[in-house]
Image: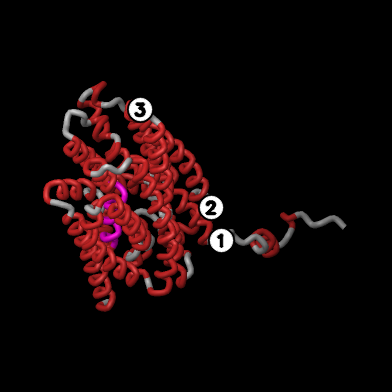
Amino acid sequence: MMPMPSHALPESSRTVSVHGPEPQGEVKPGEIAVGVVIGRASEYFDFFVYGIASALVFPSVFFPFLGKLEATLWSFAIFALAFVSRPLGTVLFMWIQRRWDRSTKLTAALFLLGSCTAGIAFLPGFAKIGSLSIVLLALFRLGQGVALGGSWDGLPSLLALNAPKDRRGWYAMLGQLGAPVGFIISAALFAYLYGALSPTDFFDWGWRYPFFAAFAINVVALFARLRLVLTHEYERELGEHELEPTPVIELVGAKGRHVVIGAFAALASYALFHIVTIFPLSWILLYSDQSVPQFLAVQIVGAFLAAGAVVVSGLIADRFGRPRTLAALAAAIAMFSGFAPTLLGGGAVGQDAFILIGFVLLGLSYGQAAGSVTANFGSKYRYTGAALTSDLAWLIGAAFAPLVALGLCARFGLAFVGVYLLSGAICTMAALAVNRALKLRS
C-alpha cells in the first residue's frame, strides 16, 4: 500500500510530523563559554601587544627627542586614549546594531580593530616622518578603543543567564581567562624577539611582528564569533533574554546609578590590572638592571599563576557569593598595597615577588570582576548596561594607571603605587556596600 502524500494528511497530523519529533536545539552554557573565551582571548592579545609596546618600544620609536622618562609618559598618555574612546565606540556600534543587525556591528568593529592594529604595524617612526607618526599613532589608538567598544557581542551576559545558579561564579570566570592567556602569548613574543634580535633590528622592524600576529588572530576570531552568534539557536536565545541594545540616554535615565556602582565595584581589580602588567615593565627599564627578557619571563610565570587563580575564583565565588568574594579580595589588595612599595624597591627579588603576588591577586579578583552587579539592570537594559559598565570600569580604574603610577613614583617615590592600589580597593568596597544597601532597601 502506497503511503499517503503529506499534503493529503489531516492538518493536525502534519503539525505533529513537522514539529513534534524535531525540537529546537538548546544552547548549552559550555558552548557559550567557548565563544566568550575565543572573543576575549583575541581582544586581550591585541590589548597586551599594544600595552607592552607602549612601555618597551614606543618611547624610543616615536619619542626619541625626549628623555626616557618623559618619552614613556607620553607613550602611556597615548595608551590611555583607547579607554577614553571605548565608551564612544559602544554608543556608536549599539546604534549600528539597532539600525542594521548584530553581524554588521561585529564585522565593522573587528574590521576597524584589525585595520588599526595593522596600521600600527606598518607605521614609520619619528625618524622617518616626524610628528606625523605620533599623530597617526594616536589616531590608530583611538580607533582601537572605538572598535573594542563595538566588539561587545552579549555572550558573557547570555552565559551568566544560562549558567546554573549554583555555578555562576564558575562560568563567569571562563571569559576572564582570556586576560592571562593573551598576556602570556604577547609577552612571550616580545621576550623572544627582544632577546633574539639586535637592538637595531628589534626597534627597526622586530617589534612589528606581534602586531601582525594580532591582526591575523583578529581575523580568525571574527569568523569564529560570527559563526557562533549568528546561528538560529543563539539568535533565539539572545532574543528570548532581551539581550538587545537600548538607547544610552534611556539606560542612564532608568539605571544610571547601577552603571556607576558597577564601574566602581570592579575598581580594585582594574587598578591592579596595569600595575602588575604594564607599569612594572616601564619601571624596570628606567630604574633597574634586570634584563627585559628575564623580567618578561617572570611576568609570564605570574600570568600562569593568574590563570590558575581565575579558575579558583570561580570555586570560591560559588561557595561564598560573588559580592563577598570581590569584597574580600579588595581587602586583600588593600593589604598588598602596603607592601607594594617595599617590594618594588627591594631589588630583583622584591620586584619578582611583587609581580608574582600581584598576579595571583589579580587572577582571584579579576576572575569575578566582570558583570558582578549586572543583574541590577534587569533583562531590558542588561545588554547595553553591561557593556557601558565595563567601559567605565576600564576608564576609571585602568586607563591612566601606568601614566599616573609612573609619573607619581618618579617624582614622589614608590609609596604612590600603594596609594593608587589602596584607593581602588576602597572604591570597590564602598560600591559593594552601596549596592547591598540598595538591595536591602528595595
Query: Does the stretch in magenta take in 127?
Result: no
Magenta-drawn segment:
266-278
**Pointer 1: what residue?**
26
Q: For marks 2 and 3, give the CA distance.
A: 39 Å
Q: In the rendered image, which residue does mark 2 sit on?
A: 232
Residue at 24% across, 63% down:
425
Residue 414 rendering spot, x and y as whole percentages: 18, 53
Helix, strand or loop at disc 3?
Answer: helix
Question: Residue 47: which numbered mark, if any?
Answer: none
For marks 1 and 3, give the CA distance: 45 Å
Query: Label 2's element?
Result: helix
Where does the C terminus fall, quadrant-wise? bottom left
Between label 1 and label 3, give the one nearer the viewer.
3
Write down the quadrant of residue 365 in the picture: bottom left
| Secondary structure mostly taken by the magenta-highlighted segment of the chain | helix
Amino acid type, mark 1: Glu
Tag 2–tag 1 contact (CB < 8 Å): no
Q: Which residue is mark 3?
A: 122
- Residue sitting at x 21%, y 41%: 77
Horizontal relation, residue 171 to residue 264: left or right: right
- The type of colouring in the image is secondary structure
- Kindly identify the residue that appears in the image at 65 percent across and 61 percent down: 15
CA gap between label 2 and label 1 equals: 10 Å
